[in-house]
Image (cartoon, helix red, strand yellow):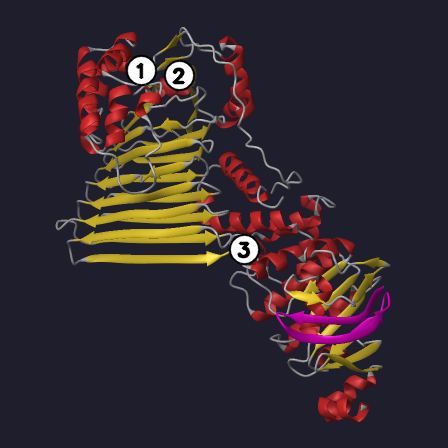
Amino acid sequence: MLTLKDLSVTIGKKEILKKINFTFEEGKIYAVMGPNGSGKSTLAYSIMGHPGYKANGKSKMTFKGHNILELEANKRAEEGIFLSFQNPLSLAGVRVYQFLQLAMKGKKDAFAIRKEVQKYAKELKISEDLLGRSLNEGASGGEKKKMEVLQAAVLDKSLIIFDEVDTGVDVDSLKTIAKFLESHRKNKTYIIITHYNRILHYLKPDKVLVIADGELKKVGDHTLANEIEKSGYEKIINSQN
Amino acid sequence: MQQNTDLNFDYKYGFSMPQNYTFKAKKGLDREGVIAISKIKNEPKWMTEYRLKAYEIFLQKPMPAWGGNLSKINFDEIYYYIKPTEKQVSSWEDLPKEIKETYDRIGVPEAEKKFLAGVSAQYESEVVYESVNKELDRLGVLFCDMDTALKKHPEIVKEYFGTLIPSSDNKFAALNSAVWSGGSFVYIPKGVKVTLPLQAYFRINAEKFGQFERTLIIAEEGSSVHYIEGCTAPVYTTDSLHSAVVEIFVKKDARVRYTTVQNWSKNVYNLVTKRARADERAIMEWIDCNIGSQLTMKYPSVYLYGEGARGEVLSIAFAGEGQVQDAGAKMIHFAPNTSSRIVSKSISKDGGRTSYRGLVQVMPQADNASVYVSCDALLIDEKSRSDTYPSMKIKNSNVTIQHEATVEKLGDEKLFYLMSRGISKSDAEGILVNGFIQPVAREIPLEYSIELNRLINLEMSGSVG
């Protein structure tokens, strides 16, 4: 579904990602793990098409057979990619419903969107009050993450990247989010970027990718996540070399 | 929210109809010209004299040396009076075809059907179309153009006209006083609350023609009214001058809200003097949105004369390429327990310039006054500019004052966030700008805020091509 070939990404003059090669397959769950500053979020932003993240000339990125490297973020979204932000922004004066309606581009009418939002909000235990406000205004860290998940569900994209959806979230909320993701995973590919094993107890990854120093160091099955939890990144990364 | 696929934005109201006037004054202004205007209108002697005196003051007054570049205004190249049709008509069908078409394009009749209590649409100098709701008549509300008011209600006009903004106030107030034509007259009797907004549209349709409308609103004790003024004008290559004077009298316990959505085309100098007087416990609210014009200089003010009076100015200014919006507010506290609130939101884009210029003055006798000033500027790009000139003269120590000012840039991260949801860059900019002005925009009646929203989206999308 998504193929990265020799993906090297620079921010300013600094090379963050170095020749990443990987193919994400449809309908599977991937965990992307790695120490702080290893390039996990850069990978997420690069896939989504942040204009500040430049892929070098030899990099290739194809999604459903299309080259998407030249596309702006909104076009990549139209192709079927969604990014749940590590630090979701609050947008003053931008109403949740109005925002989602614009993002849906008339594919669903306002009433249908509203019904869907309310349904998902209930499942995610998001208060009605939050939906009536400007997006994420006055929301807690956990509430913001839930709003990201809600947006992902409403916009219904085929590839969803969750950038640390589990940080800043209490135990109960984490469980709620994980269960929600599990029950809505049909026809979807998840890339779950995380530091911890916690969320993976609820959402069993088909593959675990370990990124360190901007390189894809190791790929394994779900047991790799357990191993990381037990022995830390250093050992795993070094053992490979 | 409107989605725009057309990136090359043509000014929506930039069409012009063939000119078909029964009378067209010559260019430039002299004593005889002033007398001629008064004569054509068949005015009482005191008004002719008032005009002439104002004309003398206009000649003596220097041009304002601040705010914006006024050096291109050539007073000799302007028509000061044009009468578009023989006489006023009372029904829509009777209007000349071009005028009807022009209005149809702005949507006057539709707007009227929806929620108007009365329409007074000014086309050039004279009000040509006017329908006053029977209900207003029944309540004793007077709503007509100023020329008609001078004929029908001379005693009220004479009592108030020019008493709040004398001709000597500034050069453009003097000019307006000398050559004024049209504008609205609103009189709300004691205790009458007009729930539906009164609306008036203004347009300029003749090249080099200055529009000098004069508005007078009197709200008697315990009454209330919301007056809405919306401006659009066709694009012409030479500069046009719009210089209005608006005087509002808010009596004891009365409330007046005056909403403006100004969208003059980008060759218009918009130099307007607006002032209100608020008596005991009266409330005066100015909601002022400036999107168009080449240069706007406008500082709606409230003179808080009565104890417990409240004044508000909520404003939005948008300056695109080549535009200067020099707008602000003036609040003068003359009495105890008076309060004022100024909220200004400005957006600059493509090298446009916005300035907030404000004055809050608290007099020694204004004990326990409360002042709130908040001005936020949003810069869309590096080329654009925003300045703040807040001035406070506080002569009483028992005062509560709050002042906030922010400048922010439309952040790349916010844009990326919205775009990652499938929203195009121009729509994302539009949604962010509309979010920014939301605290003021929500005070505007729905129909206008939708129009404002569209205008801003159009302005935002203009840059992307």
Which dot marks residue B147? Answer: 1
Q: Amino acid at mark 2?
A: Val
Cβ atoms at labels 3 and 2 below 8 Å apart: no
Question: Mark 3 falls within which chain?
Answer: A
> Where is B280 relative to B245, above or below?
below
Give the class, few, some or many, for how many residues have Cα within 10 Å of label 1's Cα (few <14, many ≥20).
many
Q: Residue at x 60, y 66 (%)?
A: A143
Residue A23 counted in the magenta span: yes
- As drawn, is A72 to the left or to the right of B81? right
Q: Residue at x 30, y 30 (%)?
A: B246
Kindly indicate the quadrant of the structure image that contains residue B44: top left
- In the rendered image, residue A141, in percent from the top left (x then y), is placed at 57, 70
Q: Earlier in the sequence, mark 1 or mark 2?
A: 2
Secondary structure state at the residue bearing disc 2: strand
Q: Amino acid at mark 3?
A: Arg
Front one among A180 and B68: B68
What's the distance in space between the residues labelled 3 and 2, CA to CA?
43 Å
Front one among B121 and B173: B173
Secondary structure state at the residue bearing disc 3: loop
Which dot marks residue B127? Answer: 2
- As drawn, is A228 to the left or to the right of B383? right
- Which residue, as the protein is rendered here, is positioned at the far left? B364
Q: Residue at x 22, y 31 (%)?
A: B165
Cβ atoms at labels 1 and 2 below 8 Å apart: yes
